[in-house]
Image (cartoon, rainbow, N blue to C red):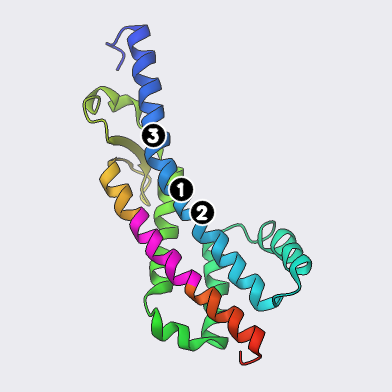
Amino acid sequence: MSKIPGRDRKILLEKLSERDASIRGRYLISASSLDSLMRDIISYHFCPPGQDEKRGQFISLILEQHLLKPHIISDILEKIVTLNYSDQLKKYPALFNDLRGVSDYTLWISSAKLDTSRASDITGQEDVIGLSYYDQNGELRHNDVSLEQIEERISDCSNLHFALEDIRSEIRDKILTGTG
């Protein structure tokens, strides 16, 4: 990268940063909507519809301030669904494994660094970014992530979003009718 003249290097880095924001940003927005939806479902379980102010406080004071890690939220939701709405597990048996997969990938993709040292290697690939990270053994690794891979992950998030929307609707209905 140091062989590239200063101005050209700056332009290359700006383009690379924009591409990174576009590729990773699209995924992170999609994944964060799942987290919000899980918090919403948990809040409905503890604060039934009609208690919107109390539900809003519960989300703000408990779920958003003290339970920031997505694994914790999905673990709580899994317990609630298992104990109180087990029929939903029959409809979506892989839901919580899939949510853990999204959470793991989200943690990885958000903590990996944009690899500017290899920028010139992927300059012509407008839909690819290079990321660097340290594996569990402390060794530096490099991974290219394409827009196509991200779109597949976004599709997975969309499927999970649909399932969570369905579960939220079922929980709300059971709470409102008193059958839950």
Q: What residue is disc 2 on? A: 32
Q: Which residue is at a point 50% across and 69% down the rendered structure image?
A: 165
For the residue marked with disc 3, what is the amino acid?
Answer: Asp
Q: Nearer the viewer, residue 168 or 138?
A: 168
Residue 170: image x %, image y %? Answer: 53, 81
Q: Earlier in the sequence, mark 3 or mark 1?
A: 3
Closer to the chain start, of discs 2 and 3, is: 3
Where, quadrant-wise, is the C terminus in this rendering? bottom right
Q: Which residue is label 1 attached to? A: 28
Is 80 located above or below residue 150 in the figure? below
Q: In this view, does 178 lie to the left or right of 104?
A: right
Q: Is residue 108 toward the left or the right of residue 78 in the image?
A: left
Q: Which amino acid does label 1 sit on?
A: Leu
Q: Is the magenta stretch mostly helix, strand or loop?
A: helix
With respect to residue 124, does 4 lie above or below? above
Could you give the CA–CA distance between mark 3 and mark 1, rounded to whole angstroms? 12 Å
Q: Marks 1 and 3: in contact by CB < 8 Å?
A: no
Q: Distance between the residues labelled 2 and 1?
A: 6 Å
Residue at x 32%, y 25% (from the top left corner)? 117
Q: Which of 86 and 53 is in front in this view?
A: 53
| The magenta segment | 154-165
Q: In which quarter of the image is the N terminus?
A: top left
**Front-most of 12 and 51?**
51
Q: How crowded is mark 3: few (under 14 residues within 10 Å), some or many (20 or more)?
A: many
Label at residue 20 = 3
In the rendered structure, does residue 111 fall within the stretch colored magenta? no
Asked whether the residues under the numbered discs 2 and 1 touch, taking CB atoms below 8 Å apart as contact, a structural biologist would say yes
